[in-house]
Image (spheres, rainbow, N blue to C red):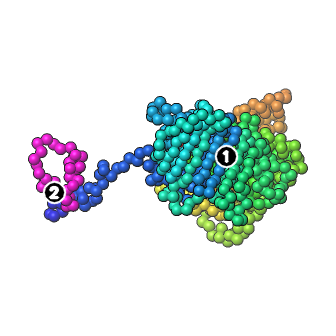
Amino acid sequence: MDDMNDLFGTADKRPRSTSRPVDPLVQAARQAGNSASTPAARDGAESYSAADIEVLEGLEPVRRRPGMYIGGTDAKALHHLFAEVIDNSMDEAVAGHATFIEVELSADGFVTVTDNGRGIPVDPHPKFRKPALEVIMTTLHSGGKFDSKVYETSGGLHGVGVSVVNALSDHLEVEVARGRQLYRQRFSRGHPVAGLEQLGEIHNRRGTKIRFHPDEQIFGKGATFEPARLLRMTRSKAYLFGGVEIRWICDPSLIKDKDDTPARATFHFPDGLKDYLAASLNGDFQVTREIFSGKSDKQGGHGSVEWAVTWYGGDGFLSSYCNTIPTGEGGTHEAGFRNVLTRGLRAYADLVGNKRASIVTSEDVMISAAGMLSVFIREPEFVGQTKDRLATVEAVRIVENAIRDPFDLWLAANPQEASKLLDWVIARADERVRRRQEKEVSRKSAVRKLRLPGKLADCTQNAAAGAEIFIVEGDSAGGSAKQARDRASQAVLPLRGKILNVASAGNEKLAANQTISDLTQALGCGTRSKYRNEDLRYDRVIIMTDADVDGAHIASLLITFFYQEMPQLIRGGHLYMAVPPLYSIRQGGKVAYARDDAHKDELLRTDFSGRGKVEIGRFKGLGEMMASQLKETTMDPKKRTLLRVDVLDEEAATKNAVDALMGTKPEARFHFIQERAEFAETDSLDI
Ligand SMILES: Nc1ncnc2c1ncn2[C@@H]1O[C@H](COP(=O)(O)OP(=O)(O)OP(=O)(O)O)[C@@H](O)[C@H]1O
């Protein structure tokens, strides 16, 4: 009964004097001062009310949660303040309004960045009725870069950077020279110390000067800028944009004994990234005599790309930038770079008849590549305010299109150098394969103990190297494939009906699905975080489905399965699609196979244009083909065509493609496969 009292009694004891029903919210508020014996007090609800909900105004959120804006309060975050300020000056330079930037680190720990750009506007803001400068410095999300009217390609995007610096500085002073007048305003911890001052006429100066000192309350006592780190950041900006000269000044008292940071220096690099790369390799061994480099004409304009890459004896690295912002975690532009170099080398190998390059993956190309890449893109999308990773999907194609032809030309113009490079990269691929084989041998006995699905017709060889598994649609196709295969190296796994759509199935459904469990068991490599490449039992996993809409759908479901459950398998270059023919064409003793209508028409025009009756047969499915036909057209490594499935290393691009594959309309899925298959014929298939 006590319990019942607890539940209802308190309410009953409340005075019933009110004549009108009381709004429960109002009542709750009135009760807020009641004794701890109320039920609300016991579950803690009483102490949590509207009064606890804070709305942080102005720059307060930045001071309360600096990590959200600059990634923390450590040394990296501290130096990020400087990046925000110099990035604004670089944006002025790239937009063609500034040619000169000066960075000064003084003994008192202040950093000053001066440019000769247009100067931050100082006229009254039409809405806020304060000078624009003050609005910019004290309001989050205020800026001139939300569209591309004032700046075409800018590193600034969010209108947040310099106001964050202001919030986190105990002193910050801005001077603007504009329209022959000099203005100044001072701030402390995000608040104006005084209004905008007009200091009088000035004739020999224009632009913006920002001088600031990081707040020790935020960054801790004694937190200061490191001269060497600041110098590196400054110098790299000059490499990234040949149209700017940057002067560096550092108080000598800050330079430690062994530090070779100069007290003064001037940086101007019209040859940009190539110079940078050559300087950072410092005479290290390089595979080719020349660095492969180039840049598009209108540097700084939307879609312009600059790059420099060489292959050398050390560990590979790729330093990338978008609109002069360093993208330390890579992104879409890097994905385009890897793709275009890998494809270019493979295409060159085809051209010169080097068959060994077919095993080369982007990992083999990049593992010893030293590269620099800089792109300029209108309204780029980054992940987070510190902009470490570029997410603009379009950047993949921008980079590929800019570099494809120059790379082909570079290889073709230096055949000796190109073949040295090809041999070098193939040697990296061989090393990778050898490493894998060594692991393979050591786990051979473990493999024997594996439980394999009953439907699998396994190959006889144990080692994964050179082994293939064909995943086929239905038992009848499975039957033909078993007859057509090479038993030593080719395994066949027939799937019953359509595979589950993993993109929409829950984990439980996935675990219970027989087809999926057969597949996972046969491959042996595990899924998701349990995936182990060394346990993969085959080198090539080949999806072989009918050349029709249903087949395309099954293939797309399978690719989605691999993409979701074993993305590493795709990245490692193990997933392929077989290309079975749709038509047979006969004329007398001559037989040819066409993969689609266009191919059939082309063959009829070219190879079967002579006299004699032409018979055209259409295969209804793989199961209908004779084993010898299936072998000759689709399975025999010497005669077949395979499409390798590639993942663009960029998540967003891949997700889009998977969405296209898995869209609700079957026509859309089919369309995608057909379209890409055409393209991929000489290349690889991007999903
Ligand atoms: N040196 C400068 N010269 C001219 N205008 C400037 C300069 N620095 C800042 N501005 C102006 O102030 C605005 C706000 O700068 P802020 O650094 O806060 O954001 P942003 O650069 O627009 O974007 P992000 O938050 O991504 O850095 C800029 O958009 C620009 O219009």
Disc 1 versus disc 2: distance between alpha carbons? 71 Å
Amino acid type, residue under disc 2 in the picture? Thr
Tell me if I can see residue 336 in this picture.
no
Q: Residue at x 54, y 54 (%)?
A: 214
In the image, residue 37 sits, relative to residue 384, either above or below, namely below
Q: Secondary structure at mark 2?
A: helix
Mark 2 lies on residue: 10
Question: Label 2 crowding class (10 Å Cα cut-off): few <14, some 14-19, many 20+?
Answer: few
Q: Nearer the viewer, mark 1 or mark 2?
A: 1
Q: Residue at x 66, y 56 (%)?
A: 251
Q: Which residues are magenta?
A: 11-38
In this rendered view, identify the residue nearer to me: 525 or 174: 174
Q: Residue 19, percent across and down?
A: 11, 42
Q: Residue at x 72, y 56 (%)?
A: 262
In the rendered structure, the answer to whether residue 504 lies left or right of residue 210 reads: left
Tell me if I can see residue 246 in this picture.
yes
Q: Residue 106, percent across and down?
A: 62, 54
Task: Tell me the chief SS of the magenta region.
Answer: loop
Q: Is residue 98 magenta?
A: no
Mark 1 lies on residue: 102
In this rendered view, identify the residue nearer to me: 387 or 645: 387
The quadrant of the image that shows the N terminus is bottom left
Location of residue 179 (image quadrant): top right
Contact, CB < 8 Å: mark 1 with mark 2?
no
Q: Residue at x 50, y 39 (%)?
A: 196
In the rendered structure, the answer to whether residue 242 lies left or right of residue 548 reads: right
In this rendered view, identify the residue nearer to me: 182 or 398: 182
Amino acid type, residue under disc 1 in the picture? Glu
In the image, residue 631 sits, relative to residue 529, either above or below, namely above
